[in-house]
Image (cartoon, rainbow, N blue to C red):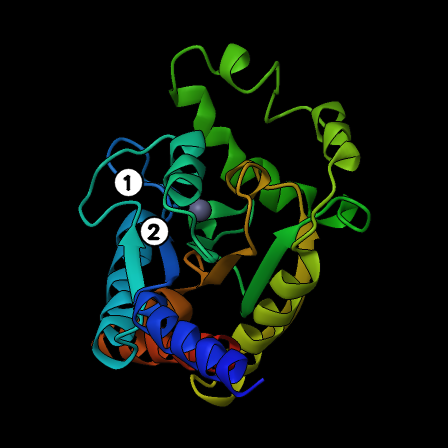
């Protein structure tokens, strides 16, 4: 019996070194290159997303040596939506975080809408969120052969979203849990309006096979929020808020 216990201890201690770098986080800065995303008065969504994605990743790299951070882009380049999910799947990621900035239909006419939202994939309560999903998904029309590659999916058609009902998100619970932590940190650490956690049919999340969320940092067509998200203080606070959420989620 003693020998068996010794054997178990030996095997366990041999396995411990392999646990290093076992956790992989994929950070996805939305849009990029020819796809600017939503437009503000003085900035573009793609640049806000990238600045906060890089700052968040840096905090993880500095504070969580066991976590491997992979970025879908680190520069202003165009990456197709399905490629973003493929990067996460290929690297067997444990968590996928897609970072975006919101806008209303009013565009540069401006809006008083404000606050942060975090989405997980799902359609059962998603009818209200179709507008946000349609806008974020419409980028695929810039990609070649998108109808073929996304199995006939038309990002502007409501009917196309019905296919999401057939898909099971086995990672839903964890995604929702992390999304709640992110929202909580946005209000407590960054002083943002917490609009809550929602489900919607985002293509970028559809093909990921791990817990995944899509963050909307605030409204680029709200002058105050745009200014905040482009400021050094705003970038520091928002990236720290996502990091705080990640750290608690990861520890659990
Ligand atoms: Zn976006």
Q: Name the residue under label 1.
A: 32
Residue at 37% x, 50% y: name it: 28
Count how many numbered circles sit on residues in the image: 2
Q: Measuring from the top left, give residue 152's x and y in whole percent.
A: 61, 14
Q: Residues within 10 Å of mark 1 (few under 14, many from 20)?
A: many
* Pair 1/2: label in front: 2
In the image, residue 33 sits, relative to residue 195, either above or below, namely above
Who's the residue at 22% across and 70% down the image? Answer: 58
User: 221 or 51, which lies in front?
Assistant: 51
Q: Mark 2 points at which residue?
A: 29
Q: Residue at x 76, y 24 (%)?
A: 159
Instruction: Please identify the quarter of the rendering in which residue 203 is found.
Output: top right
Question: In the image shown, does 167 or 156 lie closer to the viewer?
Answer: 167
Q: Where is residue 23 in the image (x, y as percent from the top left)?
A: 39, 64
Most foreground residue, 95 or 40? 95
Relative to 41, is 192 on the left or the right? right
Q: Position of residue 166 (x, y in %)?
A: 78, 33
For mark 1, give the secondary structure: loop
Whether residues under marks 1 and 2 lie with C-beta atoms below 8 angstroms apart, the answer is yes
**Element class at badge 2:** strand
Q: Is residue 197 left or right of residue 182?
A: right
* Left or right for 153, reference 244: right
Report the Cα–Cα distance between label 1 and label 2: 8 Å
| Crowdedness near tag 2: few (<14), some (14–19) or many (≥20) residues, C-alpha within 10 Å | many
Query: Tag on residue 21?
Result: none
Instruction: Name above or below for residue 167 compared with residue 3.
Output: above
């Amino acid at each position: 019996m003693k020998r068996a216990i010794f054997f178990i201890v030996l095997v366990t201690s041999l396995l411990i070194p392999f646990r290093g770098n076992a956790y992989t986080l994929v950070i996805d800065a939305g849009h990029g290159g020819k796809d600017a995303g939503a437009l503000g008065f003085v900035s573009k969504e793609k640049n806000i997303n990238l600045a906060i994605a890089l700052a968040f990743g840096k905090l993880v790299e500095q504070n969580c040596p066991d976590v491997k951070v992979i970025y879908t882009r680190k520069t202003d380049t165009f990456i197709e939506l399905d490629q973003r999910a493929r990067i996460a799947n290929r690297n067997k990621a444990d968590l996928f975080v897609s970072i975006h900035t919101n806008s209303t239909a009013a565009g540069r006419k401006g809006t008083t809408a404000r606050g942060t939202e975090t989405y997980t994939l799902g359609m059962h309560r998603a009818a209200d969120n179709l507008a946000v999903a349609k806008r974020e998904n419409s980028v695929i029309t810039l990609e070649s052969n998108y109808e073929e590659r996304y199995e006939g999916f038309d990002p502007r058609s409501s009917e196309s979203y019905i296919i999401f009902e057939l898909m099971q998100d086995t990672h839903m619970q964890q995604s929702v849990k992390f999304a709640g932590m992110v929202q909580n940190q946005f209000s407590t650490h960054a002083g943002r309006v917490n609009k809550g956690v929602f489900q919607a049919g985002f293509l970028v999340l559809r093909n990921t096979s791990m817990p995944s969320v899509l963050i909307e940092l605030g409204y680029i067509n709200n002058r105050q929020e745009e200014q905040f998200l482009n400021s050094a203080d705003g970038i520091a606070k928002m990236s720290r808020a996502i990091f705080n959420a990640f750290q608690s989620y990861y520890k659990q």
